[in-house]
Image: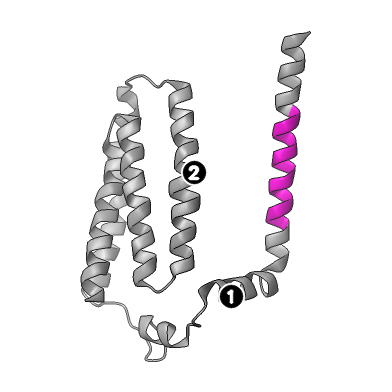
């Protein structure tokens, strides 16, 4: 039954990802992206990562997509045919991915008996948020702090740039 749900989520994710790139209207592209985000969250649920599914919905489907829609509405993009003129390059990029996908489906990958989805589910803790927090604040503490400093500098820079624009328009 899990394979059926995984297959459903995987097929919908691939189709909506193609629609995100293929649709010419950016609003329809954003709606396809929203459907893809929700199905990625469903895929996380099938992998027993409920915390990541909630974060996926809150952060990506909630905040990032709304930000994307605001930018699209603010820019008021007109119909542009040059955007979709790169289909040859996209085909060259997708061809190796398609070949790799077919090899994986055919069972060409070798897995050792102690590794894989079954072993990871057995070794997973019952509290996903606790496991993520322990790993984040022990193993990845330094990169986490560096990322927070980079975000702080970006936020201060955005405030300074916004203040400079408002001060120059007033004077």
How crowded pointer 2 is (Cα within 10 Å; few <14, some 14-19, many 20+) is rated as some
User: Depth check: 99 or 51 in front?
Assistant: 51
In this rendering, the answer to whether 8 lies above or below 135 is: above
Q: Residue at x 46, y 38 (%)?
A: 66
Q: Residue at x 31, y 58 (%)?
A: 97
Q: Is residue 85 visible?
A: no
CA gap, disc 1 to disc 2? 25 Å
User: Depth check: 149 or 35 in front?
Assistant: 35
Q: Residue 30, how many percent across, how many down?
A: 36, 38
Residue 84 position by quadrant: top left
User: Depth check: 156 or 79 in front?
Assistant: 156
Between discs 1 and 2, the one toward the N terminus: 2
Q: Is residue 3 visible?
A: yes
In this rendering, the answer to whether 62 lies above or below 26 is: below
Label 1's element?
helix
Q: Residue at x 68, y 70 (%)?
A: 137
Q: Residue 171, how many percent across, how many down?
A: 79, 8
Q: Quadrant of the N terminus?
A: bottom left
Q: Residue at x 46, y 60 (%)?
A: 54
- For residue 2, the mark is none
User: Magenta stretch: dominant SS?
Assistant: helix
Name the residue carrying label 1: 130
Residue 164 position by quadrant: top right
How crowded pointer 1 is (Cα within 10 Å; few <14, some 14-19, many 20+) is rated as few
Magenta segment boundaries in residue numbering: 146-160
Q: Residue 48, how many percent across, how many down?
A: 40, 74
Name the residue carrying label 2: 64
Asked whether residue 147 is drawn in magenta, I would say yes
């Amino acid at each position: 039954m899990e394979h059926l749900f995984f297959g459903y989520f995987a097929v919908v994710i691939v189709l909506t990802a193609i629609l995100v790139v293929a649709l010419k209207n950016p609003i329809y592209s954003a709606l396809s992206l929203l459907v893809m985000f929700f199905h990625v969250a469903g895929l996380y649920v099938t992998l027993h990562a409920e915390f990541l599914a909630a974060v996926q919905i809150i952060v990506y489907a909630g905040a990032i997509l709304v930000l994307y829609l605001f930018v699209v509405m603010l820019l008021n993009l007109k119909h542009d045919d040059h955007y979709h003129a790169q289909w040859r390059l996209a085909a060259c990029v997708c061809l190796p991915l398609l070949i790799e996908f077919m090899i994986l489906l055919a069972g060409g990958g070798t897995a050792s008996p102690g590794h894989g989805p079954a072993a990871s589910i057995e070794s997973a803790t019952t509290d996903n948020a606790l496991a993520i927090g322990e790993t984040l604040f022990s193993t990845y503490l330094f990169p986490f702090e560096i990322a927070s400093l980079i975000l702080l500098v970006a936020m201060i820079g955005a405030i300074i740039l916004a203040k400079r624009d408002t001060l120059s328009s007033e004077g």
